[in-house]
């Protein structure tokens, strides 16, 4: 296939390999920082294409570097490789061969897409200046592979000027995309609150400090933070996902443990939630003659698309699918560690539709029934390829 071949035709010629790659990854899923087979497969394919390849970055990360025809800007393209600890129930012919591990979020598709992009760009490297970094990242589902890859130096040697990525999305039909400047996905942090009271007999509550009752009051007061202290136009969520206290029906508990998640679409709101959760929990506990031990574990920051890069990405997306199918949409309260790359270099993260209800490919992400329409794969390849070529060859 020669460089003058129309790009879409060149990508379509890769369809069979693209689907085969995706199904291979789907059948052999691996959890975060355990993607040894996936990383080896990716590295072998990159090296077979003649791409300079590094492995073992942040344990299982892989980076390929394609040098263009002359010096210029450097663009990073990212795909995540990990699966989820879930038993697949799709019944697909290519179902997971590893019970308890399932590509239930489309990362198998992301990895296959970036491998195809690598092949197209390697063939066309005489057409663009600068370089393309292909980042195959581990552990997006947790505890996070983007931050340690950046700490290992992937944004340097050569220095990255812009970054792009995509996520297949079953909330959008195949042939649609969502491109949005500014906040796209929420930050995600978790918290633990341990209430320390005084236990005793259930028939003599006046002799105790009931940790369960105080914990319940804390749950209610945490919701007031969102409803009464956060700007209604700022997205924020505090959810208590687990509450444990007590061991027997007639024993008042001396300890209760609450754990939950914190989501925000604004870094300032995120800081407010962190501060007020601690203050409210300790204040409610003190009012009930108890104490509260509060731990907040920072996770992924807000995923923010650079406004100018989002406008550029939209212009590119409108050449891949009909312009009417390129939507702005609304931010999503789910989190994504592409946020770390976008904090390190301006860029844009695009959501690519993968839903097909007629084929029963509409189940939500992180579901045992999740699967997506593979017709979305070449759309993703064309998008990332054009983003890289467009960014490296544009003026200014």
Image (tube, grey):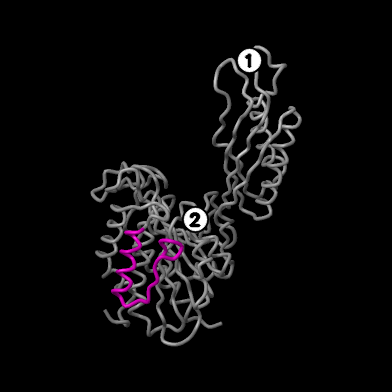
Labelled disc at residue 46: none
68 relative to 32, above or below: below
Q: Residues within 10 Å of mark 1 (few under 14, many from 20)?
A: some
Residue placed most toward the observer, 284 or 272:
284
Which of the 4 image quadrants contains residue 60? bottom left
Instruction: Tell me residue 88's x, y (percent).
Output: 32, 43
- The image shows a total of numbered marks equal to 2
Q: In x, y percent, where is residue 268?
A: 69, 54
Q: Give the left or right position of residue 209, taking residue 339 as reference.
A: right
Residue visible at 34% across and 49% down in the picture = 371
Quarter of the image where the C terminus is located:
bottom right
Q: Which residue is mark 1?
A: 202
* Along the viewing direction, whichever of 363 and 326 lies nearer the viewer: 363
Q: Quadrant of the N terminus?
A: bottom left
Residue 64 falls in which quadrant of the image? bottom left
Is residue 38 within the magenta segment? yes
Left or right? Give the position of 239 relative to 114.
right
Q: Along the polypeptide, which appears first: circle 1 or circle 2?
A: 2
- x 71%, y 29%: residue: 290
Q: Could you classify mark 2 by the number of other residues whose Cα lies within 10 Å: few (under 14), some (14-19), or many (20 or more)?
A: many
Q: In this figure, which residue is indicated by the disc labeled 2?
A: 144
Mark 1 or mark 2, whichever is nearer to me: 1
Q: Which residues are magenta?
A: 36-61
Mark 1–mark 2 distance (CA, rounded to whole Å): 44 Å
The residue at the far top in this view is 203
Residue 137 coordinates in the image, percent (x, y): 43, 62
- Residue at left 58%, top 61%? 304
Residue under the image location 57 percent in, 38 percent down: 259
Question: Residue pushed farthest bottom?
Answer: 70
């Amino acid at each position: 296939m020669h460089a003058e071949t129309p790009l879409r035709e060149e990508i379509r010629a890769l369809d069979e390999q693209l689907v085969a790659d995706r199904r291979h990854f789907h059948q052999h899923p691996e959890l975060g920082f355990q993607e040894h087979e996936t990383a080896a497969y990716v590295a072998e394919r990159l090296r077979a294409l003649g791409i300079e390849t590094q492995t073992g970055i942040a344990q299982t990360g892989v980076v390929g570097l394609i040098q263009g025809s002359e010096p210029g800007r450097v663009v990073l393209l990212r795909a995540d490789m990990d699966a989820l600890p879930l038993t697949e129930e799709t019944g697909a012919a290519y179902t997971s061969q590893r019970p308890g591990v399932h590509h239930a979020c489309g990362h198998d598709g992301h990895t296959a897409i970036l491998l195809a992009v690598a092949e197209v760009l390697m063939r066309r490297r005489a057409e663009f200046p600068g370089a393309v970094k292909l980042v195959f990242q581990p552990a997006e589902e947790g505890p996070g592979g983007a931050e340690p890859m950046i700490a290992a130096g992937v944004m340097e040697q050569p220095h990255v000027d812009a970054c792009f990525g995509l996520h297949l999305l079953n909330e959008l039909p195949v042939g649609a995309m969502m491109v949005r400047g500014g906040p796209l996905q929420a930050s995600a942090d978790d918290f633990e609150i341990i209430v320390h009271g005084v236990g005793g007999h259930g028939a003599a509550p006046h002799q105790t400090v009931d940790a369960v009752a105080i914990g319940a009051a804390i749950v209610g007061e945490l919701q007031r933070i969102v409803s009464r202290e956060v700007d209604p136009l700022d997205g924020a969520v505090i959810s208590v996902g687990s509450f444990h206290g007590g061991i027997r029906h007639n024993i008042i508990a001396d300890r209760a443990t609450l754990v939950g998640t914190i989501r925000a679409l604004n870094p300032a709101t995120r800081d407010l939630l962190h501060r007020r959760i601690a203050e409210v929990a300790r204040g409610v506990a003190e009012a009930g003659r108890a104490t509260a031990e509060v731990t907040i574990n920072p996770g992924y920051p807000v995923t923010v698309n650079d406004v100018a890069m989002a406008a550029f990405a939209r212009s590119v997306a409108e050449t891949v699918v009909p312009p009417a199918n390129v939507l702005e949409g609304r931010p999503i309260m789910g989190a994504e560690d592409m946020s770390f790359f976008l904090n390190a270099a301006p860029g844009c993260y695009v959501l690519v539709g993968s839903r097909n209800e007629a084929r029963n490919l509409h189940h939500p992400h992180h579901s045992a029934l999740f699967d997506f329409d593979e017709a979305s794969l070449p759309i993703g390849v064309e998008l990332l390829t054009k983003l890289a070529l467009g960014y490296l060859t544009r003026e200014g």
